[in-house]
Amino acid sequence: MQFFIDTASLDEIKEAQDLGVLDGVTTNPSLMAKEGISGEQECMDHYKKICDIVDDKVSAEVIATDYDNMIKEGEKYAAIDDKIVVKIPIIKEGVKAIKYLTSKGIRVNTTLIFSAGQAIIAAKAGATYISPFIGRLDDISRDGVDLIAQIVNIYDNYDFETEVLAASIRHPMHIVQCAEVGADVCTCPLSSILALINHPLTDNGLAKFLADYNKTLEVESA
Ligand code: E4P
């Protein structure tokens, strides 16, 4: 399973990259706004800064919602760096844009996926990734992880190469559940990635090991 970090914060991206387990980054207009980034040029400069930190796969989401401007924006983002993956929402114009951009060799992450039907059409259009938002489904009392399992099963049936990128992750158990049902990628907040490391028995066990070690030093010096 690949790990992407779901943020536009350069500090968080650096922290995850330093951990040595990061495979990519996803952003969206809300995450960019949270960092105070506005306007096309500022966005492009910020994407470049992200690309300079990580090894590959930086999702940059288009703002346009019509085909012509989606592909124009997508091509502009793709020209920033080879690491860019253009993020396109699953709307009718978006499907055409996915088809066009992928035919030009530009990787596409299809966003705002909430149904298996949307996942099928994005794969047919040639998307590199689809992003089902599992937390937002859970928020309305649907089972987001079930959707991931359903899409993984459908893609397996037809050998679709599109990768299932579980998004809108709210907590570390979402990551474990997505791994169990075969998601290719999870994009997570830094807090969820770091929370995977923690276990109270690890903390207690380590404290005991260190205390026992220190006791031997006391005996030696007595
Ligand atoms: C990922 O690509 C999405 O931008 C993100 O995971 C959405 O998460 P949210 O539902 O927490 O906003």
Image (spheres, rainbow, N blue to C red):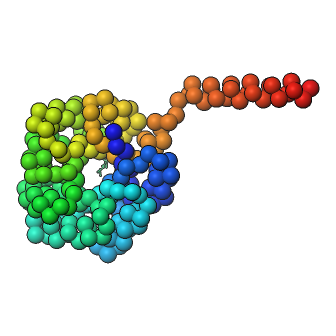
Return the residue found at the far bottom. 41
Q: Is residue 30 left or right of residue 68?
A: right
Image coords of residue 164 (percent x, y)? 23, 42
Q: Which of these two is toward me, 33 or 132?
A: 132
Q: At 48% across and 56% down in the image, what residue appears?
A: 14
Camera-nearest residue between 47 and 23: 23
Q: Position of residue 119 (x, y in %)?
A: 14, 43
Q: Is residue 116 visible?
A: no
- Mark yes or no: residue 152 visible: yes
Task: Locate the N terminus and report the quarter of the image it occupies.
Answer: top left
Q: Residue at x 35, y 57 (%)?
A: 56
* Residue 149 in picture, x, y percent from top left: 21, 32
Which residue occupies the extreme right position in the image? 222
Between residues 81 and 36, which one lies in front from this camera angle?
A: 81
Residue 61 lies, in percent from the top left, at 25, 60
When asked about the image quadrant of residue 139, the answer is: top left
In the figure, is residue 10 to the left or right of 27?
Answer: right
Quadrant containing the C terminus in the rendered view: top right
- Left or right: residue 36 compared with residue 67: right
Residue shown at the point (41%, 49%) measured from the top left: 22
Q: Is residue 27 above or below residue 172?
A: below
Query: Residue at horizontal 86%, vertical 24%?
Result: 219
Tally of numbered tags = 0
